Image: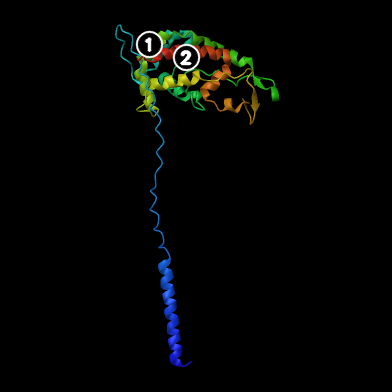
Amino acid sequence: MGPSARIAVAALVVAVAAGAAWYFLRSEPPPPPPPPPVAQVKPAPPPEPPPPEIHPVPEAPKGEPAPPLPALDQSDKAAAEALVALVGAGAFERYFVPESLVRHIVVTVDNLPRRSMAMRLAPLKPIGGYAPTTGKDATLALSPESAARYAPWVELFAKLPTAKAVAAYVRFYPLFQKAYEELGYPKGHFNTRLVQVIDHLLTAPEPAEPVALVVRHVLPEYADPALESESAGRKILFRMGNANAAKVKAKLRELRRALVKAG
């Protein structure tokens, strides 16, 4: 085959290959279009919790206008006189700390639903000492003496004249509110917080007695982890025993009814 013939054959091969390539490329379906971009749908934000229910302060009883309140910093004398009128001079001297009464009442109420509270800021004198126990190891439990230590306090609280106590509270409420705002709640309502705390205490469980204890570190703790994780206020109810706690809850229900303004 001469040069010219080889060139002709090569040209023919190239032509056929090009034709075949054109045919097959034309026969293949065009690539599908890229999928449309998927819109990034943001998850709906979680619903905001409902605002806390605001419990207005009950109205002061009608009658002669009360004398003007002192400033919060100078309120100890007036607050002590109001408490003496409710519980008597002897009980006031025995149970109450006369300094910073209004502020200490407010901070204690606010701390009762929390895990801990500062006893040095309590308006009541401490019982003192550790809760008495009975048994050891597997039989370690709260002693009945623990409930006995709280009995005088509970009787004093149970006999509190509800109507007079609420009337005194309403009179001093501007001072309670100011002390509450000082804690860092400039838009809060102390009466609302008080009702919330009462509700928290009213729903405290009643542990089976005697309440079992365990020493995990140094001091006895509640053997039931659920009880050990409870708030400072509920643990006080546990230590005073179910019978005393029932009396406290009964008085709290009376006070709550008086504190929550109908309608």
x and y percent of residue 31 in the render?
41, 61
x and y percent of residue 19 in the render?
41, 75
User: Which residue of the protein is positioned furthest toward the bottom in this rendering?
Assistant: 2
Q: Secondary structure at mark 1?
A: helix
x and y percent of residue 28 in the render?
43, 65
- Please name which of the two marks, 1 or 2, marks the residue nearer to the observer: 2
Residue located beneath label 1 in the image: 167
At x 39% / y 20%, what residue is drawn? 191
Up/down of 187 relative to 242, above or below: below
In the image, 202 versus 181, the foreground residue is: 202
At x 52% / y 24%, what residue is drawn? 232
Quadrant into which the C terminus falls: top left
Q: Can see residue 250?
A: yes
Residue located beneath label 2 in the image: 252
Q: Residues within 10 Å of mark 2 (few under 14, many from 20)?
A: many
At x 52% / y 11%, what residue is drawn? 247
x and y percent of residue 90 in the render?
48, 8
Q: Tell me which amino acid carries mark 1.
A: Ala
At x 65% / y 28%, what residue is drawn? 215
The quadrant holding residue 134 is: top right
Q: Secondary structure at mark 2?
A: helix
Left/right of residue 223 with respect to residue 158 in the rendered view: right
Q: Tell me which amino acid carries mark 2.
A: Leu
Up/down of 27 relative to 245, above or below: below
Left/right of residue 152 with respect to residue 220 in the rendered view: left
Q: Residues within 10 Å of mark 1 (few under 14, many from 20)?
A: some
Task: Check whether the beta carbons of the residues at disc 1 and disc 2 lie within 8 A of each other.
Answer: no
In the image, 198 versus 119, the foreground residue is: 198
Q: Can see residue 73?
A: no
